[in-house]
Image (tube, helix red, strand yellow):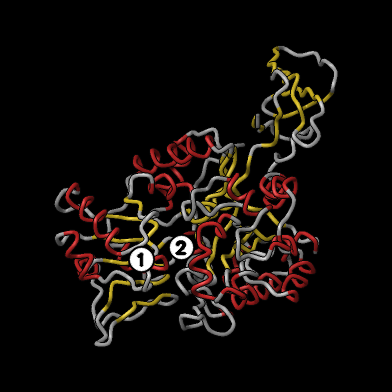
Amino acid sequence: MTTLYRNARDWRDGAHVNFLVREGKIVQKSSNHIECDEVVDLNGKTVMPGIFDCHMHVLNAGLDLSALNLHDCNSRSEIEELVRERSAETPSGQWLLAVHYDANRFPDGRDVHAEELDEWTGGKPAILRQVSGHACIASATALKMAGITKSSIDPSGGRIVRGECGEPTGLLEENAMGLVYSASPKPTRERMIEAIRLAAESLKSYGITATCDMSTGQYNLADELAAYGSANVSTRIGLYILWSRVFEEDGTQRVFEFPESDRLRVSGIKLFADGALGSGTAAIYGEYETGGEGMLIYEPDDLKRRVKIASDAGFRVAVHAIGERAVDIVLDAFEATGIPESHRLEHAMILSDEQIERIRKLNVAITMQPEFLMEFGHAYTRRLGPERASKLKRIRSLVDAGVRVALSSDRPIVSGDPWKGIDAATNRPEGFDPSENVSHEQAIRLYTQSGAEIDGWEFGSLEVGQFADFIEVN
């Protein structure tokens, strides 16, 4: 069965084009009529490749749609009002879960305290997840249910923030978040399927036809793999599974089953090297304006060991590294695999000229999220100061250096609207160095073709041999 999509206009130059599709793939393109079994007339509409959001969190995006959203709160009093309202609607025994909490928006920058949160919820367990996803506030009841006390020891790669007397304040950073989330209810497989479908519908509304989930296995790997397989969505999804869900600490690989297809596959392994700028946990050189130098999730040799184990097992490895100190450690780890070009560096928000040149030489792929500049400029300026913050996300410098770069969202950290990301990449917000802007056409390529090439997908430029994943743009 062949389908001819006729009378389309190419997004780059407006030229008329017809393309013949068989079994989902483009088998012929021409400006003339092509023999076929059926015809779909696009009536002169402009078409472009579907957007590929190569770094987001599909399951969490769907789950977050039912959580309390604190995105528009600029003070503790606004958060208190929303939390009290949601708590009144929350049945006894259930947890109150909120997202997009950001104390950087408060005039004094002071976080909500566990006791405050407990008062607002009337003693119901509650978690406010920081907008970066790298810290949270747990209520006093939630801390108690998780067994987090004055005598609790900080987990490796995490920190329980404490007051003057050593009591937990409720602020949990990086791996310490797992202490309280492990005590909270986990979504069922049925709930996961529903969330994946909701997320896919939302992606479709933005023109996103493919994506990568970058933290598969955070709840239960078997259930998550089964949920992705059962959701049966049209969006193509590549899964990056958390290292600890695939390997034992000694490097032994666990066995798991997964029904791969043209629309669903395991793309690689995910690791974290550091935290986030908004929470002050990204590993930087020097100190933040607010104090501290961030944290490493693993010691350098341990990260190098984990990356090598995954690489030797045949996986592409994607490592989260936001601060420039973490970037250096990740590049060392990639180089030690002997095939650095096979792996992905996620975020790389702070880069020196020397690091960009090293990335080029190693041929490491980079993914960046320009929408962050629109959403979190206030936090970056507060943490780094205006001059240092202005140099974040050097997209143009990477492109000009010949580095393989792809753009994405990291949703649900931000809205995930790729058109906002394209705008931020082509017209950086006030306060960010405009010399790092790229052209509109470049930004679209970085949201489509570049990510597909980096991850080895057969789509992204609507060429013969690729899947006919296209969207209409007028």
Q: Position of residue 185 (x, y in %)?
A: 27, 54
Frontmost residue, 371 versus 231: 371
> Total of numbered circles in the picture?
2
Image quarter for residue 425? bottom right
Q: Is residue 276 visible?
A: no
> Label 1 to label 2, Cα distance in Å?
9 Å
Frontmost residue, 291 versus 60: 291
Q: Is residue 345 visible?
A: yes
Q: Position of residue 346 (x, y in %)?
A: 60, 62
Q: Which residue is mark 1?
A: 136
Residue occupying the point 30% across, 81% down: 162
Q: Position of residue 354 (x, y in %)?
A: 75, 76
- Amino acid type for the residue under numbered disc 1: Cys
Frontmost residue, 161 versus 329: 161
Left or right: where 291 falls relative to 350: left
Frontmost residue, 327 versus 223: 327
- Amino acid type for the residue under numbered disc 2: Ser
Left or right: where 401 falls relative to 225: right
Q: Answer few, some or many: residues within 10 Å of disc 2's Cα (few below 14, many 20 plus, some between 14 and 19).
A: many
Query: What kind of element bears circle 2?
Result: loop
| Quadrant the C terminus occupies | top right
Q: Which residue is mark 2?
A: 132
| Quadrant the N terminus occupies | top right
Image quarter for residue 175? bottom left
Residue occupying the point 60% across, 78% down: 325
Q: Is residue 191 above or below residue 354?
A: above
Residue occupying the point 56% across, 52% down: 409
